[in-house]
Amino acid sequence: MVLRLKPLDLSQIQTASIRRRTYKVTADQLAGVPQPAEPLQNFYRALPKVGEAAGLLDAAELMAQTVLMSKPVVWIIDQALIDAGLSPVLAFLMRRGLVQCLVMSGGAALRDYELAFNGMTTEDQALGLADGLLGLTRETGEGINAIINEGVKRGFSMGECLGRGILERQPKQFTNSLLATGAARLTPTTVHVTVGADGFHRYPGADGAMLGKGSLKDVQILTSYLTTLPVGALIVAAHADLALNQVFLHAYALARNLQQELQGLNLVRIGAPEPSLLDLPALNRVQQVPGALELTVPLLVGALFSLVE
């Protein structure tokens, strides 16, 4: 006789304070923002116009043309960008109006929340697997689920309620929060979770209905935004998350279903993103910027400023 398995009872699991865990990224390791000073412009002018340096400059030129023509820029990121300490750089671009839509994985949202409230993130995975406490810090699990559960019930998407929650509470590092910056500027900032992939999904306060409803609404918000993209809009892909890639591709397909004129987009691929974005039809230009995110993103942003300032 086959017995039906019961859901796991999470009421007796062990948790730990974030202050007693080991993390790999702290607030004092975050990047500074490149300034558009003359020496910076001279630095980029002096770069060789060959190889990866040429690719970097070509990508910066494409981004600059997009900005100067007042075309929208959409960034797609996963946790790797935040692990690389780059959230202050992207938050600065958002505040300058150089990002019109931000698409995030659940892992990126988790790290954004932890950095904002605790000034640290990117837990030591090996240690967490060894002691069974991976992703089970109380402050993160209780706080992030409380915001999601309350906000989604009020009709907000996951990205909206997390951004508003961080912005309203204004923790010490909230100015580096991409979610809070998106909420403050009313920039569409969508969060797309893979249920079970992040620690806060397994916390006792997690509500599967709220996780699913909040993330599904973000899919609808993303699709709605994509239907408005004009010819010449730019997609900046700085992720390697296969699930996030599929979310974007399906949102794009649905947007094409609703808006047949959606075409003529440009693409900048930073680092080693999943290549299926190249399947987007009618791509006009594609620029690849290979290398480690912690180096390529600051260099690319600095080159952008050298062209538009």
Image (tube, rainbow, N blue to C red):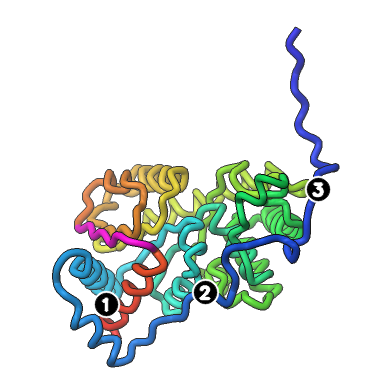
| Mark 1 secondary-structure assignment | helix
Looking at the rendered structure, the kind of residue marked 2 is Leu
Looking at the rendered structure, the kind of residue marked 1 is Leu
Nearer-N-terminus badge (3/2): 3
Q: Is residue 32 depicted above or below 144 in this figure?
A: below
Residue 21: x %, y % from top left: 71, 60
- The residue that mark 2 highlights is 30
Alpha carbons under labels 3 and 2: distance apart: 31 Å
- The residue that mark 3 highlights is 14
| Mark 3 secondary-structure assignment | loop
Q: Is residue 102 magenta?
A: no
Question: 201 or 96: which is nearer to us?
Answer: 201
- The residue that mark 1 highlights is 68
Looking at the rendered structure, the kind of residue marked 3 is Gln
Task: Give the residues in magenta.
Answer: 285-292
Q: Is residue 235 depicted above or below 4 in this figure?
A: below
Question: 83 or 176: which is nearer to us?
Answer: 83
Residue located farthest toward the top when viewing the structure as drawn: 1
Q: Is residue 293 depicted above or below 34 in this figure?
A: above
**Apparent side of residue 276 relative to residue 220 in the rendered image (left or right):** left
Q: Is residue 290 magenta?
A: yes
Residue located farthest toward the right when viewing the structure as drawn: 12
Instruction: Determine the residue positioned at 28% across, 92% down.
Output: 38
Nearer-N-terminus badge (1/3): 3
**Apparent side of residue 284 relative to residue 206 in the rendered image (left or right):** left
